Amino acid sequence: MLNATWLETFTTLCETGHFTRTAERLNMTQPGVSQHLRKLEDQLGQPLIARDGKSFTLTPAGEALFETGLARRREEQRLRERIATDLPDRGVVHIACSGSFAILLQPLLLEWMANAPDLSLHLEAAPQATIRAGLLDGRFDLGVLADDPAHARLEAQHLGREELCLVLPVNALEQIESFSDLETRGFIAHPDGFAYADDLLQLNFPGSYPGADRIRLRGYVNQIGQIPAAVARGVGYTLLPRSGVETFAAKDQLRLLPLPKRRWHDLWLASRRGRPMPARMRRAAELIAEAAASLR
């Protein structure tokens, strides 16, 4: 790799055409300029200038290197301008959250993107463990977690909470007095559904709930937007965070049945600790907080 200092000395020498003026411009000695030139020639294995008394001309290798020096200057200038101009509507942001929260957040992100052509947003619906791992290895800039990650390399801000809901068809007017009332209908499962069942149903039916691995299944769906569809058609029941219900197009066909003991999942906005957050990520964090606030 070419030494950046030597290359800048050579580029300036090409511009001035004079060793003394180059030394003055770079606040160097003339022997220092000559030394940088010799080091470049040794590194490249070719002469870069052809001397003619006190003047010189560039060899073909020197002309190529001069072009490289000018190009590197332009690249550095663009880098400096990019760093100095931290705009909220430019750059890339990677966000990860649950599937239900992703559906709630996406309209806000799409509106932002529509007005920001230089912005690239990547939203991934992922399990909690994947979100944590992605934050730690740099795949995700921001993640929405259900609890404080409590990790030395992560920091988190509490955004609020959303209720875990028992979802039935809108015409299901009977009361659920025991777990057998739910078993008659059957469970519409999904990737997080079994953990939700052990969380909410065990809490409310401790004497009869057998565990998620033994409940009666009516179906399984891995697309968050389609999980409530079967229930809306009168098939089974499911368990979802409120965001998964609020974003369902036919939510008027669903009934949220309150149970005696309610459960909420916290929402934490997590990122890597100590990393300066550019303007685009601060804006993304504001939209995530706005989506979380809509669940209160």
Image (cartoon, rainbow, N blue to C red):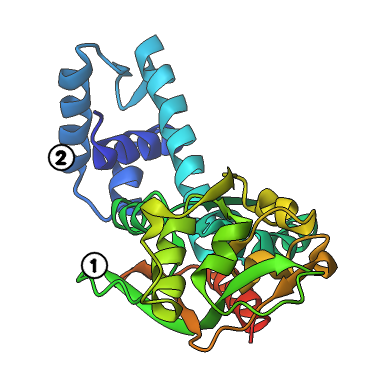
Residue at 19% x, 48% y is 29
Where is residue 100? Give x, y as percent.
60, 61
| Distance from Cα at disc 2 to Cα at disc 1 | 49 Å
| Residue 85 in sight from this viewpoint | no
Looking at the picture, does residue 151 appear above or below residue 40?
A: below
Mark 2 or mark 1: which comes first in sequence? Answer: 2
Based on the displayed image, in which of its 4 quarters is residue 286 positioned? bottom right
Q: What residue does disc 2 label?
A: 31
User: Quick check: 171 left or right of 82?
Assistant: right
Based on the displayed image, in which of its 4 quarters is residue 234 positioned? bottom right
- Which three-letter amino acid code belongs to the residue tagged 2? Pro
User: Quick check: 96 left or right of 53?
Assistant: right
- Which three-letter amino acid code belongs to the residue tagged 1? Arg
- Please tell me which residue lies in front, 89 or 102: 102
Q: What residue does disc 1 label?
A: 153
Where is residue 214? Give x, y as percent.
39, 52
Looking at the picture, does residue 127 appear above or below residue 33?
A: below
User: Quick check: 17 left or right of 108?
Assistant: left
Looking at the picture, does residue 62 appear above or below residue 258?
A: above
Q: Indicate which label's residue lies in the foreground, 2 or 1.
A: 1
Residue at 73% x, 56% y is 113
Where is residue 45? Give x, y as percent.
19, 12
Q: Secondary structure at mark 2?
A: helix
Q: Quadrant of the N terminus?
A: top left
CA neighbours of label 1 inside 10 A, class few (<14), some (14 to 19), many (20+): few
Q: Quadrant of the C terminus?
A: bottom right
Q: Secondary structure at mark 1?
A: loop
Where is residue 218? Give x, y as percent.
60, 47
- Please tell me which residue lies in front, 45 or 207: 207
